[in-house]
Image (cartoon, rainbow, N blue to C red):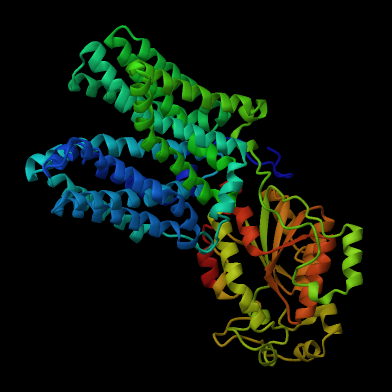
Amino acid sequence: MNALFGDIPVNPATWRETLKAMPYLPITLVAVAGHMMLFGMLTPVMAIYAQSFAVPDWQIGLMITVFAAGRLAADLPAGHFASRVGIRPLLGFGLLLCSLGAVLGALAPSYAMLLTGRVMQGIGSGLFMTAAMIYLAQNSDRRSRGKVMSMFQGATLVGGAFGPSVGGLAANLFGLSGPFWVAAVIGLVTGLLPLILFKETASQRDNPQQSGSRGMLGLLLILPFLCVLLANFGFFLTRTAGQWQMIPLLADQRYGIGPDQLGLAMSLSAVANLVALPVAAYIVDRLPRASIIAFSLLATAAALAGIAMADSAAMLFAGMIAIGLATGIGGPAIGAYAVDVVPARQQGSAMGMLRFAGDLGYLVGPLAIGTLVDVGQLGYDGGLFINALLLVAFGAVFVLGGRRLLITRPHEHTHPLEPRRPLTMTDRIWDKYLSEEDKAVFASSGFGSLAEWGKRPALLVIDVNYAFCDEKPTPILESIKKWRTSCGEYAWDAMPVLEKLIDTCHGKGIPVIYTTGTQRADKWDAGSWAWKSSRRQDEAHSTAPLLTSDGLDGNEIVAEIAPGPRDIVIHKQKPSGFAGTPLVSYLQLLGCDSVIVTGTTTSGCVRATVLDAFSLNYRVTVVEDGCFDRAQANHAINLCDMHAKYANVMPSDEVINHLNGLSQGMYDLPSGAGMERVAAAE
């Protein structure tokens, strides 16, 4: 890797790096395992419990159908609203809804009430599982996503494996309603975990994604994402129609295999699936994920065909193990690849659609395959062949997608459909200050085109100190009576934006570099600053420093965005953050190829820093609502001029979307050791 020019690292993240970058991953995985245990423990008693309500046999299947329908109904809305309400509420309240549904089932006086509880559980499950996948998608990167998705699948297997035995024990101890009560307790405990322990940054909560029907339709136009939807549909269909329906019926008809041996075969398949996950974690972060999915689809199809043609029970057992291995490798690749190929701002909607495709296969698979077998008199082996042919067809879609689709490695994906601002100079904050002739000049001269993003940015926060901001939002004419350089209330309008940007960079491990002023106590080093401000000349003769009400120097960065121990602070004496400072040296040390500039004043220190960065061949982005100035005409026109020639001037939501799509852990940041003591001493 070339640190100077900023190539994105391609080596997979270590387990330690992955866990460090995702501090709430263990909580999420524990909740996932609890969720799967909650539902697994109901399987031993569902049919018998339904019979206790004296319903016809055909209605017993509604216990599964209404649950699947509830989950299906929740998948897409969960993806849509995750960026609006946050991941944490969906995780917590989804599980609490599952718990409430279990209580309703335990207390149900009628079968209709029991089914209502199952619908509630399905909705809660859809909310929770979609939110969990969105968290994993947004907080992992291409270097770690295979590991993360493997751990997610492992948590589902572990929870699902222990569930039935716990449910059977609860039924023996407390009767048929016992598993529902225990499930309610598990749902309550695991639901409280994310609500109490899980935290989200402001950018995660307040960064609405492009969603809704138009956003989802746009995702369907991305060929790799459409391929992965089909693959997920196929794998879930195989689970219910192939593994849970056709194979048990074929085993009974052809070999006379009873429930005990069939249960052993299914357990061996689950164990094989679990054994495959460490392998998946290794290869999914290294090899082209589309090729892994295509191989998994074809291998699963071959295993189904092998079972259909098997002439012995041993062959059936071998086929079940093969299915476990193939799906164990393909499952993590599906989740990781789906995130790779969609724009960062649409990850929530994408995860909702991925869950929907899987749940749709889960729901319609048994009915569709069963109907074809009955109508066509194909036999149970014919049903398995149909299942296998579907998987072959879905695998063929990947192959037909082209060689590029199959050979692209995890770190090489781009998002060609990522929404971008129009390449024009109109409809912006400066538009009202431009004459028609000005607009025509910009339109015909080509100024204002968007340059490409850099690969390794640093966030620059220019001079957001008390001298430029005052201690609280104050009308500017009042504020400058004390602080002659103050931007008054305009500074505080930008403060929430700066907090979001800094939080986002901290969360992604992106460098945050602050600048602020410094001067001798006798003001001798003011130099040229004293030439253009009469009040600066007066200050030069003052012996008392200008301090805040708490005794802080005016050059102190405001507390609301105060630097953290791992941030970098540069003291400067001239407008540009580069003039006479080690800023270039630090950017080279970090391997940065671009800067994202915020702060004040737009027409002064921000502009000077932007021009120097541009002159040094850094790619420059200026955050439109993250900068401020004393005079609003100056602010707008300088943004206009920088956007025309030197930088991309973009709103903060687009910048945050871009930052969230970058890889985690790209930089060797300062450790921050001892910096708290330095700050305290100052």
Height in image: 494 above or below 238?
below
* Position in image of residue 216 (x %, y %): 56, 49
Q: Is residue 317 left or right of residue 201?
A: left
Image-quadrant location for residue 42: top left
* Position in image of residue 440 (x %, y %): 90, 66
| Foreground residue among 24 and 224 | 224
Q: Residue at x 67, y 52 (%)?
A: 419
Q: What quarter of the picture does the C terminus occupy?
A: bottom right
Q: Is residue 287 visible?
A: no
Q: Is residue 68 left or right of residue 103?
A: right
* Position in image of residue 176 (x %, y %): 11, 43
Image-quadrant location for residue 193: bottom left
Q: Residue at x 24, y 15 (%)?
A: 253
* Position in image of residue 532 (x %, y %): 85, 84
Q: Is residue 314 left or right of residue 513?
A: left
Q: Is residue 664 visible?
A: yes
Q: Residue at x 27, y 11 (%)?
A: 313
Q: Is residue 493 left or right of residue 44?
A: right
Number of disc labels:
0
